Image: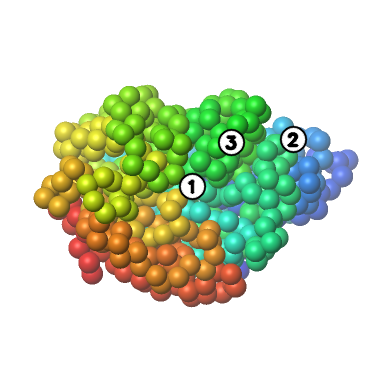
Amino acid sequence: MTAVTRRSLLIGGAAGVALATAGAGVPKLDDPFTLGVASGDPGPDGMVLWTRLAPAPLNEDGLGGMPNRVVPVHWEVAEDERFRRVVRRGVQVARPESAHSVHVETFGLRPGREYFYRFRVDGHLSPVGRTRTTPEPWALGRDLTMCFASCSHYGEGYFTAYRRLAEDHPDLVLHLGDYQYEYAAKAADVRTVLGPETRTLADYRLRHAQYKTDEDLQLAHSVAPWLVIWDDHEVENNWADEVPEQPDAHFAARRAAAFQAYYENMPLRRGAKPNGVDMQLYRRVQWGGLVNFHMLDTRQYRDDQACGDGWKTCADAGLATRTITGAAQEEWLLDGFRRSRSRWDVLGQQVFFAERDRKDGPEKEVSMDSWDGYLASRDRVTRGWVDAKVRNAVVLTGDVHAAYAADIKADWNDPASSRTVGTELVCTSVTSGGDGNDTVDEVQLRLNPHIKLHSRRRGYVRTKFTAREVRADFRALPHVRTAGAEATTLKSFVVEDRNPGLNPV
């Protein structure tokens, strides 16, 4: 792999073939690349390249200080970091109605290769990003190093975990939701959150821009392609389809604004471009014949949380009609299991999948916001991958601000004797909840023996997929309320091919 330095990723450098500038007679912009660059949704012949022009990113109107006109953005893709071997270049127009965001869908690249990309506007050169194409669909290809993270509240800590993730040089990054938070500033915050609680398009654009000005987050975006999926805080806490957390006659407009800003600020293909209150975000990305990533949306189509939400003993959670995915997405997922020929099938999704009981006795007390609140949905999905004879099923999860590793059982009514049919890996938060601590919930582990790890430290998970196994390293930081913490490996597990379940390393 070509060495990628911090300087090349954050500064870019002026070496390489010059790009054309904007038309004469138009006032020059100040540096428009304050939000960095990103890539995402890779395929065997290309990927999405993203940037958003914002010379004044923290303007209250959310428009980043850009003029009300279209701006041509020139882009290049090269095989080397110095752009001596440019293989693709073009021009994409950034429009004011899209907050001058740019989504370039490249094609014609070679499979299984590392590439570098950059943008230029008015003589300003963007930072350089590193990205990859996936191997051919039938090829196992080389091993895949993939890191995943979730839950990054700007006010509650520094994004050092993103920097440590970047330093692992992953081939791919998954973000599993709560990329940004809707809340206004709080007295206990260690960094100032700008603006009110996000409700309007201007609010959401400003909030995304403030997050994107963080250098640690920019670095993580620039080292590898990302697959992103939202959870709740990209809109508001615990929303469910058309139902807000609290009664709100304007929730549809708020949801549409949040969707629009999310698309503008993420490296997503044009098929994800929102249409009002609808946005097609669930999708499948195949990493050759090694991994099939099924990226799920468990917010937009779910039934409202049962029994008023929260942790409950709730009979309604078991109703056969309840769904967390919606019927169309569920059928899409089950069809994907039936068609898959991959070594590993991975669900990239938001909320806890395995059972998590916290009450002694025959009755169970579980979270209505997780798959425990949608028992029929979970049973159909689990049975779907078993019936399809998926070779290896792995569920990746965020949301809960704690690291977990769990075996997935065929029958949660008798998990102690039921066979293991999959594995769940849960990343802790990047910052949400502050520093965290070393307290372990021993009662939860006793009531749920399928859970093999619980930690409230902050960090991320680093995985390595090979034809023979998946290794998961739970990376933890001792603090986030001050910057610069080092990451250490809290615990490692291996999942062997055709042998579901966690093996401690």
Which numbered marker is on residue 464? none
| Above or below 478: residue 413 | above
Figure quadrant of the N terminus: bottom left
Choose the circle earlier in sequence order: 2 or 1: 2
Choose the circle earlier in sequence order: 2 or 3: 2
The amino acid type, in three-letter code, at marker 2 is Pro
Q: SS for tag 2? A: helix
Q: Position of residue 107 (x, y in %)?
A: 48, 38
The amino acid type, in three-letter code, at marker 1 is Gly
Choose the circle earlier in sequence order: 1 or 3: 1
The answer for how far apart the CA atoms under marks 2 and 3 are is 33 Å
Residue under the image location 19 percent in, 55 percent down: 501
* Numbered-mark total: 3
Q: How crowded is mark 2: few (under 14 residues within 10 Å), some or many (20 or more)?
A: some
Q: Mark 1 points at which residue?
A: 177
The answer for how far apart the CA atoms under marks 2 and 1 are is 27 Å
- State whether residue 243 appears in this view: yes
For the residues bearing labels 1 and 3, Cβ distance under 8 angstroms: no
Q: How crowded is mark 3: few (under 14 residues within 10 Å), some or many (20 or more)?
A: few
Q: Name the residue under label 3.
A: 246
Q: Name the residue under label 2.
A: 96
Residue under the image location 59 percent in, 49 percent down: 181
Residue under the image location 47 percent in, 53 percent down: 150
Task: Say which quarter of the image contains residue 487.
Answer: bottom left
- State whether residue 216 appears in this view: no
Q: Position of residue 257 (x, y in %)?
A: 65, 34
Q: SS for tag 3? A: loop
